[in-house]
Amino acid sequence: MRSPATIAAIAVLSAFILVALLAPMIAPHDPASLDLAHRLLPPSTGHLFGTDELGRDIFTRVLFGARISLGVAVTVVTVSLLAGIVTGAIAGFYGGWRDTLLNTYVMNAFLAMPGILLAIAFVAFLGAGVRNLILALAITGWVNYARLVRAQVMAARNLEYVEAARSLGASNLRILGRHILPNIVQPVIVQAAIGMAAAVLAEATLSFLGLGVPPPAASWGSMLNDSRSHLFDAPYMAAFPATAVMLCVLSFSFLGDAMRDYADPRTRT
């Protein structure tokens, strides 16, 4: 946890969180304000990241894009985590026909379909928007958490402390909520940190395809889509939002790897 990569990841994520929370106060311009007289300006003191083809300040839009990306990622991971914990706990603890139904049929059916294609089809059917985007990513992302929780619950349900609680008359719900789930939360949190990186990248991908947050809202993916026709005359339009996506995804990935190594006693020194 003291490695330079982990410290840098925490610092970058802290900066993104502060930017997302304080974007309306620190942004120098309105993210949707048009100024055609100053379109495609290179980075300068007046516009730190330049302006796009409609004269909008790119620095301001990158700041507000952090709000959308992190907000979508946190919501998607939270919804997916709750659905995965409930489904995985039921399948792993009770076993039998419940495990066969949930694991063999439901989970494997979702895993058989590419997640991003399923999300694209879902958003294309319901229409673009933040709510549909979150729902599409949660539907495709809950399976990984469910499989992890199922495996952890199956490994813990026959341990001594669970048998002791059962012999004292504890109900199944109490055993799950008070004994098993608190002892398997560590790998779930690690998976959630890594899932945040995947959610940020998925949101940028869908917004790039025009299936994410509708304009004029600022999104890193939609900014990359807008920059396609100006890659040679205004490459900064793509460079800054792409760098934001890269730093955010890498930071979550490094933090998840560090948490995984810290949780594994074999890697501790």
Image: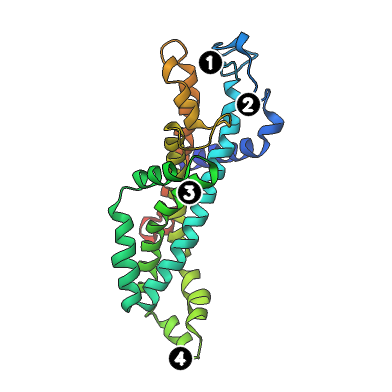
What whole-number distance in Å separates the C-alpha atoms at marks 4 and 2?
62 Å
- Dividing the picture into quarters, in which one does residue 163 lie? bottom left
What whole-number distance in Å separates the C-alpha atoms at marks 1 and 3?
43 Å
Q: Is residue 25 left or right of residue 31?
A: right
Sequence-wise, the earlier of marks 4 and 2 is: 2
Residue 178: percent from the left, percent from the top?
Answer: 53, 76
Q: Which amino acid does label 1 sit on?
A: Glu
Residue under pointer 1: 53
Residue 41: percent from the left, percent from the top?
Answer: 56, 11
Tell me which residue sits at (39%, 76%) in the image: 93
Q: Is residue 110 left or right of residue 86?
A: left
Residue 67: percent from the left, percent from the top?
Answer: 59, 38
The circle drawn on residue 31 is 2
- Dividing the picture into quarters, in which one does residue 130 lie? top right
Q: What element carries label 2?
A: loop
Residue 194: percent from the left, percent from the top?
Answer: 43, 49
Residue under pointer 4: 167
